[in-house]
């Protein structure tokens, strides 16, 4: 099936591929480089690419001056918390829809999907007022709840598409073998579904980590995750490029790594199984 | 495939998800609908009164709304054109065998994982700054006048930033679709005497058509809600040049405290999004059987 | 013990009736095969017995006890699935041990029973492997092993050999028959392959569109099929059917003759025809003959017969082996 490709063609594609790849990746690379510069070097003309005085002082300063760690922890708690909560609600639902489908299952799934398409501004006002009146504004709990609900449809969908790939035969075999519903889920379904659950977890942590509508509108100093914290650099502090870069690098690095690991699942999750 | 017993437990297991989503969707939406019929400003508490469709009239006849609608369309259209067009080219490129392909792939999809506030600020300050930005330096190096991006072409600047974020998404999905094409089909076409270009037009493109549709629809849903990128770069300005419908609702609600007006705007946004959502849900539903 | 009785069992999915109403008795230690074309309801019937589907109406009795509403695991039956349905994340040992663990058996008992089953099925060397590392035939044996350790009242097989290649299928057929002799347990076996039915069954149940067409031993069905459907389904190659004047001569709407019940001659005979395709299998030769006025008729001949394409041949049906059917397709008795 495979034919050998002339080396010259291959080299040509290599050159173009790397050129385009580096171009697209450049803003991230530039941010990382700038984070190791002094503020003066950061805005120097002509720009300094590699041969400058490398320094880690921005990282120290970002942390000491602005409670960076607190916001980082907010991001962790909110993204991981909302994802786990979502999984807890979604696993039983996805199980039911995948293995005991009824005529209405499809409609329920599509309805869930349609809630994800509801633009957030459509419910901004009541959610804001409800949060204000119940003291949930600027709290981790409030934000976790909102992100759980806003990502729940995606979690259900991803799990559903994974569960559907587990042959129903195997679950029936377990039933014949005398496993109760609980044992069936614990001993048979869950071990087989672990890869799917893991990638659902990863993708949703990514989505929740980068969510930037609710986090910006419902938090202030206390519960602000990194998205909202970085936004505070939009005002005068944005002039401190090296510090902005250091804060940004810290904010995107963990999720970038997770993202690279889950790139395959991303396609399935974000297209609701329409492209595999 | 199921017996009565499993069906009963299935219903029980679906209940939490269904009830919670129903609450999350129906209650706030009903409240928005209700507020949109009120004269209700947070700065004048206790003065709420029934206003009928007055808020809608104000919102829809506000010149800012028309600007917002136009900006929204330009933003969505611009980003779609760049990311889908670029995505097809990128997918074709990444589908070719070359050295370090895996690494390049990782670099190309990276922007998608960058949080919107970070990408907006990095682009605005470090790349597009009219004096110290990298683009300005590049322009001067080639003897050109540096562009004041956010001054002269604010909407286009935002389109560029958002496109950079969504190009990886389109690339990744189109690449996946491309790689699922049966290589025997391409070989059969080659045996039939089709050249590279005809193979692309008659075999590859039709095969990708569905994936392209999916990308267009999903991006549209997300792009209609672009918010953070505007907030941290232009605040909707200068004037209303970068105010979208989403941003306009935010301004009315949380800056002008006009609950009634913002609610009316929110409903308008819902209606706009639903027009796209209907097509998307249908497409996905077809795929479900 | 494993005596199974179906009384007026009826199954419908919504308004679609899959099984109109069936009565059937399966004796203890009997090897029963449900056979029929795909979509005839044979798998559904098996799943009703297993308890994997609800019965719409009617009763299922096992050893005289009404099991209609009982959960699958509580019926004392084991099932081997078409896909084998092995647990991919467990070793062969744990796959076979799973039903015993679920029943809360002692560790030492489990160990002994699993080892024993593995020995019977030649799986001893593979107990630590995962199903993914086994060949098709080995997976099949693991599935059977999982079924036998429970010492069920009856085994249910749902097209267990359809995923194997032809050679392996033949071998597994023998193994399952052998197993039946060793275990002395009732077996219900579903297949669409009439050869499997003929070679393995004590009793064959021929199903068509959810109805039982005929029940009987393999030779009974072969010798005296009750109607056109059974006549055409049992036997390979298929029985030849002839309608029109030739049938009317014998007072029937349709007559049927099996290929092996036609005598061949190059000199003279009852029907004259031209040889079309001749399939030489070595032991037999199947001749597809174009008979004047009748169309194509298949005849079985000696393995090394020298007839070629286009040659003239005469066919004479053995009078007492001709089956006669009325205009409703029922056999005259």
Image: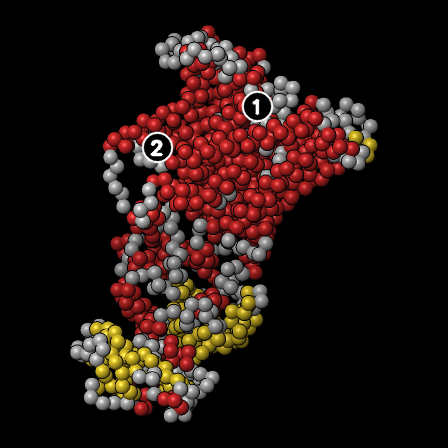
Residue A261 visible in this rendered orientation of the protein = no
Residue occupied by mark 1 = B155
- Residue B49 image point, x, y percent: 82, 32
Q: Between residue B158 and residue A182, name the one nearer to us.
A: B158
- Residue B3 image point, x, y percent: 54, 61
Pinpoint the chain carrying mark 1: B
- Relative to C107, say whether B195 is above or below: above
The disc, 2 or 1, on the residue closer to the chain's N-terminal end is 2
Image side of residue C19 versus residue B20, left or right: left
Q: Residue at x 50, y 75 (%)?
A: C22
Q: Residue at x 25, y 86 (%)?
A: C314
Image side of residue B262 versus residue C114, left or right: right
Q: Residue at x 33, y 36 (%)?
A: B96
Residue occupied by mark 2 = B102
- Residue A166 image point, x, y percent: 44, 51
**Colour convention of the picture:** secondary structure
- Relative to B246, say whether B147 is above or below: above
- Relative to C252, say whether B106 is above or below: above
């Amino acid at each position: 099936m495979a034919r050998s490709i002339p080396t010259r063609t291959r080299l040509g594609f290599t050159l173009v591929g790397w050129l385009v790849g580096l171009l697209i990746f450049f803003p991230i690379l530039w941010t990382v480089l700038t984070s190791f510069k002094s503020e003066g070097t950061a805005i120097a003309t002509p720009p300094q690419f590699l041969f400058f005085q490398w320094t880690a002082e921005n990282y120290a300063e970002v942390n000491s001056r602005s409670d960076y760690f607190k916001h980082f922890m907010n991001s962790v708690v909110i993204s991981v918390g909302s994802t786990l909560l979502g999984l807890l609600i979604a696993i039983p639902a996805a199980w039911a829809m995948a293995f005991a489908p009824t005529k209405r299952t499809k409609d329920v799934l599509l309805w869930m999907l349609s809630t994800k398409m509801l633009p957030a501004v459509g419910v901004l006002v009541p959610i804001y007022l409800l949060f204000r009146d119940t003291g949930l504004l600027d709290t981790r709990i409030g934000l976790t709840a909102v992100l759980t609900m806003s990502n729940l449809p995606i979690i259900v969908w991803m799990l559903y598409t994974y569960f559907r790939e587990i042959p129903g035969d195997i679950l029936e075999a377990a039933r014949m073998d005398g496993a109760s519903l609980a044992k069936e889920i614990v001993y048979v379904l869950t071990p087989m579904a672990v890869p799917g659950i893991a990638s659902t977890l990863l993708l949703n942590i990514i989505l929740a980590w980068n969510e930037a509508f609710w986090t910006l509108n419902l938090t202030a100093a206390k519960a602000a995750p990194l998205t909202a914290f970085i936004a505070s650099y939009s005002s005068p502090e944005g002039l401190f490029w090296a510090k902005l870069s250091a804060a940004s690098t810290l904010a995107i690095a963990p999720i970038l790594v997770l993202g690279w690991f889950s790139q395959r699942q991303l396609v399935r999750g974000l297209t609701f199984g329409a492209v595999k | 495939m199921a017996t009565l017993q499993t069906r009963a437990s299935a219903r029980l297991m679906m209940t939490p998800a269904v009830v919670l989503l129903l609450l999350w969707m129906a209650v706030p939406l009903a409240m928005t609908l209700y507020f949109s019929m009120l004269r209700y400003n947070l700065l004048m508490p206790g003065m709420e009164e029934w206003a009928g469709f007055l808020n809608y009239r104000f919102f829809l006849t506000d010149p800012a709304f028309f600007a917002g609608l136009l900006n929204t369309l330009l933003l969505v259209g611009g980003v779609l054109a760049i990311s889908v067009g670029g995505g097809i080219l990128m997918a074709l490129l990444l589908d070719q065998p070359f050295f370090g392909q895996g690494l390049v792939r990782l670099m190309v999809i990276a922007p998608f994982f960058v949080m919107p506030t970070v990408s907006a600020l990095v682009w605005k300050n470090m790349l597009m700054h009219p004096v110290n930005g990298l683009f300005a330096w590049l322009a001067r190096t080639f003897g050109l006048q540096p562009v004041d991006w956010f001054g002269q072409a604010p909407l286009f600047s935002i389109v560029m930033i958002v496109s950079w974020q969504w190009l990886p998404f389109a690339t990744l999905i189109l690449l996946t679709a491309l790689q699922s094409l049966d290589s025997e089909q391409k070989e059969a076409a080659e045996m039939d005497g089709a050249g590279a270009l005809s193979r692309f037009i008659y075999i590859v493109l039709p095969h990708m058509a569905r994936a392209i549709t999916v990308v267009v629809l999903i991006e549209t849903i997300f792009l209609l809600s672009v918010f953070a990128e505007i907030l941290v770069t232009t605040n909707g300005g200068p004037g209303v040049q970068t105010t979208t419908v989403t941003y306009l609702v935010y301004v009315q609600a949380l800056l002008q405290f006009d609950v009634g007006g913002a609610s009316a705007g929110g409903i308008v946004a819902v209606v706009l999004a639903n027009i796209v959502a209907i097509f998307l849900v249908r497409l996905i539903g077809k795929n479900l059987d | 013990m494993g005596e199974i009785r179906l009384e007026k069992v009826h199954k419908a999915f919504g308004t679609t009736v899959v099984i109109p109403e069936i009565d059937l008795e399966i004796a203890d230690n009997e090897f029963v095969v449900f056979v029929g074309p795909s979509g005839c309801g044979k798998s559904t019937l098996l799943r009703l017995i297993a308890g994997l589907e609800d019965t719409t109406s009617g009763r299922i009795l096992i050893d005289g006890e009404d099991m209609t509403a009982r959960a699958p695991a509580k019926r004392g039956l084991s099932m081997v699935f078409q896909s084998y349905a092995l647990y991919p994340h467990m070793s062969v040992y744990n796959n076979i041990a799973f039903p015993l663990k679920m029943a809360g058996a002692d560790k030492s008992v489990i160990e002994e029973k699993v080892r024993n089953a593995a020995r019977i099925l030649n799986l001893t060397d593979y107990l630590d492997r995962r199903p993914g590392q086994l060949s098709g035939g080995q997976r099949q044996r693991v599935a059977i092993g999982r079924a036998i350790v429970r010492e069920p009242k009856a085994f249910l097989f749902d097209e267990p050999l359809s995923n194997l290649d032809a050679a392996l299928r033949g071998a597994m057929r023998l193994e399952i028959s052998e197993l039946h002799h060793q275990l002395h347990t009732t077996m219900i076996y579903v297949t669409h392959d009439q050869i499997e039915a003929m070679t393995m069954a004590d009793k064959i149940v021929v199903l068509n569109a959810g109805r039982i067409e005929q029940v009987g031993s393999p030779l009974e069905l072969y010798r005296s099929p009750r109607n056109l459907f059974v006549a055409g389904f049992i036997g390979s190659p298929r029985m030849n059917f002839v309608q029109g004047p030739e049938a009317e001569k014998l007072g029937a709407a349709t007559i049927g003759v099996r290929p092996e019940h036609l005598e061949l001659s190059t000199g003279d005979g009852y029907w004259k025809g031209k040889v079309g395709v001749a399939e030489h299998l070595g032991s037999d030769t199947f001749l597809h003959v174009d008979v004047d006025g009748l169309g194509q008729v298949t005849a079985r001949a000696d393995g090394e017969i020298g007839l070629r394409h286009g040659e003239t041949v005469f066919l004479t049906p053995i009078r007492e082996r001709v089956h006669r059917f009325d205009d409703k397709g029922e056999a005259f008795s």
